Image (cartoon, grey):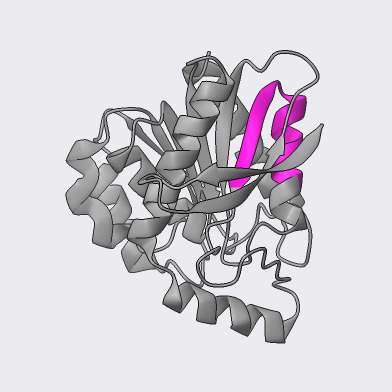
């Protein structure tokens, strides 16, 4: 079952929508699904729906609500891709993290105080790293996270498990950035890095030209095992 709900901001001075997918029975835990730069589009909603079939309450907050509420973009359409880049340039990541934290609190209440994880893609992958460092999420996963090399000074604050999926041929996360991520995080006791040689940014998208079926299935299997272990 899916629905759109309204969630109050962290400081209670606004509200934003979130897509929610609920499992058939009682949710074992909740997972916040953090969007790419394309909004809460069909691919992100499908991520939520799949997590619901695994027994989780899945919720995807509209993080672009301050810019263009309800925006849904298709990365395979050039004009919409460029529009997404524009929104990314305007996006306030600090406000986004507060919205994610508000969503975590809402989701935790929905599962009776149980565990809440987070999973994000692209921009959402970066925000998943920030979520691990700045919130009380119980476990976080980031796919092809951008700009993590600039956030390594926050690694000391990661107290709960974090998994990062790294596309080896990522046009937005080059070899130097990947090397910096490994150098900074390989010895972190709470962080697991998974490399996918030859794959490009967006390989685990649910639909569209970017998807690599084998790579997506492998990464999603690892994510499922990770959450099964840390959200139980």
Quarter occupied by the N terminus: top right
Q: Residue furthest front?
A: 13
In the image, residue 55 lies in the stretch drawn in magenta: yes
Name the foreground residue: 26 vs 206: 26
Q: Is residue 165 at all visible to an observer of this figure? A: yes
Measured along the vertical axis of the image, is residue 12 above or below residue 78? Answer: above
Examine the image and state in which quarter residue 27 appears.
top right
Could you tell me residue 122's position as x and y percent? 52, 59
Q: Nearer the viewer, residue 110 or 158?
A: 110
Reply above or below: 61 against 115: below
**What residue span does the magenta drawing correspond to?**
46-60
Q: Nearer the viewer, residue 54 or 67?
A: 67
Residue drawn 51% across and 17% down? Answer: 229
Looking at the image, is 21 positioned above or below residue 147?
A: above
Residue 116: x and y, percent?
49, 26
The residue drawn where x is 33% and y is 64% is 177
Residue 10 appears in which quarter of the rendering?
top left
Return the x and y of residue 71 as percentages of the image width and height: 67, 68
Q: Is residue 38 left or right of residue 144?
A: right
Q: Position of residue 223 (x, y in %)?
A: 57, 33
Examine the rendering and report whether any part of residue 144 can be seen.
Answer: no
Left or right, residue 228 beside residue 138: right
Query: Is-magenta flag for residue 63?
Result: no
Which residue is located at x 69 percent, y 38 percent? 20
Count how many numbered circles sit on residues in the image. Answer: 0
| Left-right relation of 144 to 38 | left
Residue appearing at x 31%, y 53% in the figure = 181
Say which quarter of the image contains residue 156. top left
């Amino acid at each position: 079952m899916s629905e759109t709900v309204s969630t109050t901001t962290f400081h209670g001075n606004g509200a934003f929508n979130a897509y929610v997918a609920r499992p058939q029975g009682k949710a074992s835990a909740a997972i916040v699904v953090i969007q790419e730069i394309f909004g809460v589009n069909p691919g992100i909603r499908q991520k939520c729906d799949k997590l619901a079939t695994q027994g989780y309450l899945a919720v995807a907050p509209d993080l672009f609500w301050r810019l263009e509420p309800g925006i849904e973009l298709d990365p395979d359409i050039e004009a919409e891709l460029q529009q997404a880049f524009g929104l990314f340039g305007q996006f306030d990541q600090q406000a986004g993290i507060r919205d994610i934290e508000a969503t975590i609190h809402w989701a935790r209440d929905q599962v009776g105080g149980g565990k809440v994880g987070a999973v994000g893609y692209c921009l959402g992958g970066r925000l998943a790293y920030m979520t691990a460092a700045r919130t009380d999420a119980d476990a976080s996963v980031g796919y092809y996270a951008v700009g993590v090399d600039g956030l390594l000074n926050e690694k000391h604050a990661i107290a709960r498990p974090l998994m990062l999926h790294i596309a080896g041929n990522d046009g937005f996360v080059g070899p130097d950035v990947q090397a910096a991520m490994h150098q900074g995080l390989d010895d972190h006791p709470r962080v697991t890095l998974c490399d996918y040689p030859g794959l490009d940014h967006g390989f685990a998208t649910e639909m569209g030209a970017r998807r690599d079926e084998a790579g997506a299935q492998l990464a999603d299997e690892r994510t499922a095992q990770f959450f099964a272990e840390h959200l139980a």
